[in-house]
Image (cartoon, rainbow, N blue to C red):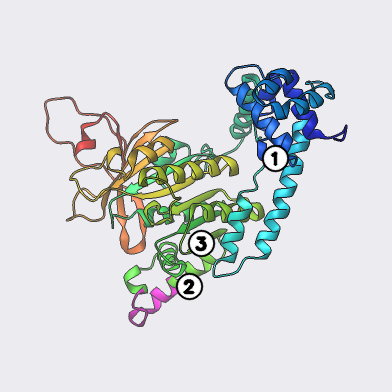
């Protein structure tokens, strides 16, 4: 065995001092070792250390006689445990290089209809281990203060990506980096239209956005985008022969505005969470995205698991991890249960426990009356870092546009009236139940 073998040096380090294991356990794993005997020695030692028992050359020899000689050899030949992290980094780097080469060979042999998607899924598994970022509170505060100072010097008050709804901007400060936002609604209420409005608003503010659509085609989304940007009726767009000259002028305006926007649409079918993560990383590397929209959870091909709830939880955790990795907000559209009457709550989200747990913000879009289809409420039912409340919307569905509206008149009651702002109702207001 070479005296300069980092795998042997790393095994020797943890045999000399088990505390060294905890300094490197997030950097390397048994699979990172090329020498099968050193891989087994590492596994034996790691298992004992995790159990809180001794794991030196003598105790390893007691539980596995065939490992005794190797354990003594690496322990006596070790330069000590202080350089364990350096040894681990070398082992991890070499392991990553081997995985990249193996992935390249796998990609070279791909064939079929989804070669690009499969290649992206393979590449997505090559994230290096040990992306650890443990810092003292002092360092985190310094980073926060620098960021806050920079924001304070800007002319705009909002710190995140604009939402298109002033009161929602006021509540959230705009869509914030690393947040997973869930927008839930029952079928045909308008969640896709509102999600598209969020994406277009970001792009109009020169903030690159990406819209993943598992339900609609890119052509259908373009139809809605032209309607929103050109202020032309979606009904007219479906019957171009009946359109007037003024409407064609509006279409031209919508198309012209849309062509200039930094916005991407992915309507891959079937759409997987792995595929979303892979293609988002690819576009982000080239254009530095500011917002992702995923439409919608029920139509995704979820990861395999023992139950639907577990599959949903894996998906939401992957999207939350992607939001943190890329430092951008992700808005995930979700369908509410069809049953039930009245205003929806968190419990009406399908697999609600899994979704609610990972989401930073949960918004519920609701149409109180079928007789007034343009009248909608947007309930910010969960907000991890801010206030909750209801924002009332006037939906111009013909033009795929939503604007803030006035809350309904408060019913006569003996209690004192609750102060309200236009378009917004506080969490404790009885209007929330109207």
Identity of the residue drawn at 77% across and 34% down: 7
Disc marking residue 265: 3
Q: Position of residue 321 (x, y in %)?
A: 53, 41
Q: Tell me, yes or no, whether the highlighted magenta stretch contains residue 242.
A: yes
Q: Quadrant of residue 219?
A: bottom left
Between the residue at mark 2 and the residue at mark 3, the CA separation in whole angstroms equals 20 Å
Closer to the eye: label 1 or 2: 1
Rounded to the nearest whole Å, what is the CA distance between mark 3 and mark 1? 38 Å
Q: Is residue 110 visible?
A: yes
Name the quarter where the N terminus is drawn: top right
Distance from disc 1 to disc 2, alpha carbons, whole Å, reads: 57 Å
Of residues 224 and 79, the one drawn nearer to the viewer in this rendering: 79
Identify the residue at image location x=47%, y=52%: 293
Q: Secondary structure at mark 1?
A: helix
Q: Earlier in the sequence, mark 3 or mark 1?
A: 1
Q: Which is nearer the eye, 187 or 86? A: 86
Q: Which residue is mark 2?
A: 252
Q: Which residues are magenta?
A: 238-250
- The furthest residue to the front: 65
At which x and y percent is residue 62? 67, 20
Q: Is residue 20 magenta?
A: no
Q: Is residue 86 visible?
A: no
Tell me if 358 is positioned left or right of 242 in this view: right
Figure label count: 3
What residue does disc 1 label? 32
């Amino acid at each position: 065995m070479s005296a300069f073998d980092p795998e042997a040096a790393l095994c020797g380090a943890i045999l000399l001092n088990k505390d060294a294991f905890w300094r490197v356990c997030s950097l390397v794993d048994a699979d990172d070792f090329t020498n099968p005997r050193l891989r087994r020695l590492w596994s034996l030692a790691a298992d004992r250390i995790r159990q809180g028992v001794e794991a030196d050359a003598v105790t390893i020899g007691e539980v596995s006689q065939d490992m005794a000689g190797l354990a003594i050899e690496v322990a006596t030949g070790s330069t000590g445990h202080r350089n364990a992290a350096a040894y681990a980094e070398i082992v991890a780097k070499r392991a990553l290089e081997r995985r990249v080469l193996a992935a390249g060979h796998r990609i070279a042999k791909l064939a079929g209809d989804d070669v690009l998607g499969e290649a992206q899924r393979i590449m997505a598994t090559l994230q290096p281990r040990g992306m650890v970022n443990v810092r003292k509170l002092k360092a985190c505060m310094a980073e926060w203060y620098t960021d806050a100072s920079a924001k304070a010097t800007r002319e705009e008050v909002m710190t995140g990506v604009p939402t298109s709804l002033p009161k929602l901007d006021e509540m959230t400060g705009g869509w914030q980096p690393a947040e997973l936002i869930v927008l839930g609604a029952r079928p045909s209420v308008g969640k896709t239209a509102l999600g598209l409005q969020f994406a277009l608003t970001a792009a109009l503010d020169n903030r690159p956005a990406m819209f993943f659509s598992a339900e609609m085609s890119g052509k259908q989304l373009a139809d809605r985008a032209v309607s929103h940007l050109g202020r032309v009726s979606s009904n007219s767009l479906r019957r171009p022969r009946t359109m007037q000259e003024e409407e064609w002028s509006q279409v031209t305006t919508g198309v012209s505005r849309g062509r200039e926007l930094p916005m991407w649409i992915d309507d891959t079918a079937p759409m997987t969470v792995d595929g979303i993560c892979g293609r988002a990383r690819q576009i982000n590397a080239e254009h530095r995205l500011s917002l992702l929209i995923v439409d919608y959870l029920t139509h995704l091909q979820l990861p395999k698991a023992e139950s639907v709830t577990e599959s949903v939880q894996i998906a939401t955790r992957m999207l939350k991890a992607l939001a943190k990795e890329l430092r951008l907000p992700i808005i995930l559209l979700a369908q509410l249960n069809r049953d039930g009457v009245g205003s929806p709550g968190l419990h009406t989200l399908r697999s609600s426990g899994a979704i609610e747990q990972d989401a930073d913000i949960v918004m519920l879009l609701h149409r109180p009356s079928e007789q007034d289809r343009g009248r909608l409420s947007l309930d910010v039912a969960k907000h991890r870092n801010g206030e909750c409340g209801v924002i009332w919307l006037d939906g111009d569905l013909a033009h795929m546009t939503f604007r803030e509206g006035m809350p309904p008149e408060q019913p006569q009651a003996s209690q004192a009236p609750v102060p309200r702002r236009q378009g917004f109702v506080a969490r404790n207001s009885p209007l929330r139940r109207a």
